[in-house]
Image (cartoon, rainbow, N blue to C red):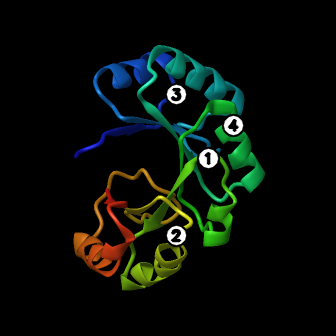
Amino acid sequence: MVKVKICGLTRANDALLAAKLGADYLGLIFYPKSLRYLPLPKARKLSKVIRENNSKVKLVGLFVDQPIGEVNQSIKACGLGFVQLHGTESPAYCAKIVGAKVIKGFHMRSKRTIESMARYAKEKPVWALLLDSYTKGISGGTGKRFDWGLAKQAKKKYLGYGENLRAR
């Protein structure tokens, strides 16, 4: 079954329209270097409006190498069901996240990236592995493709991980 996630929302009208049109997940970016960054007070207000108007849509918070306390505070304050991590977060870091499922993003540069995913697949501190393109200096959301042959190799290697291997 196909699921739709709209990420980088900053305005209530856009978020509510995305939910009304059938988005399953709405993403809020908590990474300060992003052009679509939402400080916690604004994210809290936006998430409240979303939850009051659509009880089915799930909220995803995107973070990059931020302190675990900050991530857990955002989960609680905004009612996030998921966190999407796009930095160098370790399996131990992922295991410290409380109250939300973890999606760990990997920048697909080479076969070595597939090998670096092994600890996450073995230890299972995350709900899903997300394969993303690599652009120097940018942590996700570039809209560029990576070699999908790498995605095929990763899926073959981690097929036992379950249905939660995602490529975008």
Q: Are marks 2 and 1 in contact (CB under 8 Å)?
A: no
Looking at the image, residue 74 sits to the left or right of residue 46; the answer is right
**Badge 4, how many Cα within 10 Å: few under 14, some, many 20+?**
some
Q: Mark 1 Cα within 10 Å, few/some/many (few <14, many 20+)?
A: many
Q: Quadrant of residue 97?
A: bottom right
Return the mark for residue 79: none
Which residue in the structure is indicated by mark 3?
10
Separation of disc 3 and disc 4 at Cα? 19 Å
Instruction: Name the residue at 58% across, 63% down.
Output: 87
Residue 76's mark? 4
Q: CA distance from mark 3 to mark 1?
A: 13 Å
Q: Earlier in the sequence, mark 3 or mark 1?
A: 3
Check residue 124 in the rendering and tell me which mark sits there, or answer none: 2
Answer whether labels 1 and 4 touch (C-beta < 8 Å).
Answer: no
Residue identifier under label 1: 31
- Distance, label 2 to label 3, CA atoms, is 31 Å
Instruction: State yes or no: discs 3 and 1 in contact (Cβ < 8 Å).
Output: no
Label 2 vs 1, first from the N-terminus: 1
Tag 2: residue type?
Lys
- In 3D space, how far apart are the residues under numbered discs 1 and 4 (Cα atoms)? 17 Å
* SS state under label 3: loop
The reply, left or right, for residue 136 in relation to residue 37 is: left
Tell me where residue 39 appears, x and y as whole percent.
67, 33
Element under disc 1: loop
Tell me if residue 160 comes above or below residue 8 in the rendering: below
Q: Quadrant of the C terminus?
A: bottom left
Amino acid type of the residue that numbered disc 1 sits on in the rendered structure: Tyr
Q: Position of residue 51 (x, y in %)?
A: 52, 21
Give whichever of discs 2 and 3 has the lower sequence position. Answer: 3
Task: Please rate how many residues cluster around mark 3, counting C-alpha atoms within 10 Å: few if below 14, some from 14 to 19, many from 20.
Answer: some
